[in-house]
Image (cartoon, rainbow, N blue to C red):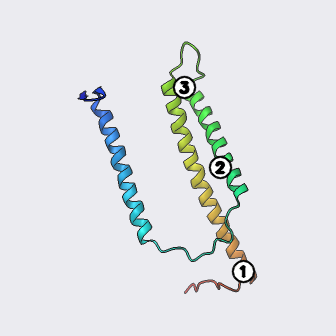
Amino acid sequence: MVRLPVVGLYPICRILQHASTIFGMGILCIWLVCWYRTTDPSPQALGNAVSTKRKIALWAAFITGAVGGAAIRVVVVSGIPTYYHFAPKRFAGQFVITMIALIWWELVAYGVFSSKAAADGEAKEYAGGKRRDHPPADRN
């Protein structure tokens, strides 16, 4: 335990946990800035951008799935909260962490499947000879 001026006694493991989180976020921010500065803009036109209605529908589905999945997981892990046996911090903590993780995995899955579908669509366009402005790259 360490005595901090404003907080009082605080466990060292918590201090180290908060410090490592801040350090990791700093490293990620530095990487993001370096990546942003060195990456060339994409030459691909945004003609096939996702519509606003579809974005809203996707986010609604992601959030609904994450909230439902988090609720199911927390009830399975912690049990159904009752008046006498209810630990709100633990319940809320598990719920929020699970929800964040599920949204993350939903976004990863969406990115993988949407990029695969886009690549398959382009391959079909090239195979059908419909796309004449951008010929396929040589595969030598």
The 10 Å Cα crowd at callout 3, few under 14, some 14 to 19, many 20 or more, is few
Q: Looking at the picture, does residue 42 appear above or below residue 129?
A: above
Image quarter of residue 136: bottom right
Q: Looking at the picture, does residue 41 appear above or below residue 8?
A: below
Q: Position of residue 131 (x, y in %)?
A: 71, 82
Determine contact: label 3, label 1, CB under 8 Å: no
The amino acid marked with disc number 2 is Trp
Q: Position of residue 36 (x, y in %)?
A: 44, 66
Q: Earlier in the sequence, mark 2 or mark 3?
A: 2
Image quarter of residue 7: top left
Q: Position of residue 54 (x, y in %)?
A: 71, 56
Task: Report the disc number at residue 16.
Answer: none
The 10 Å Cα crowd at callout 2, few under 14, some 14 to 19, many 20 or more, is few
Q: Quadrant of the N terminus?
A: top left
Horizontally, residue 58 falls left or right of residue 27, namely: right
Image quarter of residue 98: top right
Mark 1 or 2, which is nearer the eye?
Answer: 2
Q: Secondary structure at mark 2?
A: helix
Task: Report the disc number at residue 127.
Answer: 1
How many numbered marks, from 0 up?
A: 3
Mark 2 or 3, which is nearer the eye?
Answer: 2
Task: Report the disc number at residue 78.
Answer: 3
Please give the residue where the numbered disc 2 appears in the rendered image: 59
The 10 Å Cα crowd at callout 1, few under 14, some 14 to 19, many 20 or more, is few
Q: Nearer the viewer, residue 73 or 59?
A: 59
Q: Quadrant of the C terminus?
A: bottom right
Q: Position of residue 129 (x, y in %)?
A: 74, 84
The residue depicted at 57 percent of the width and 44 percent of the height is 102
3D distance between C-alphas at marks 3 and 1: 54 Å
Q: Secondary structure at mark 1?
A: helix
* Residue that lies at the very extreme toward the top in this rendered image: 84
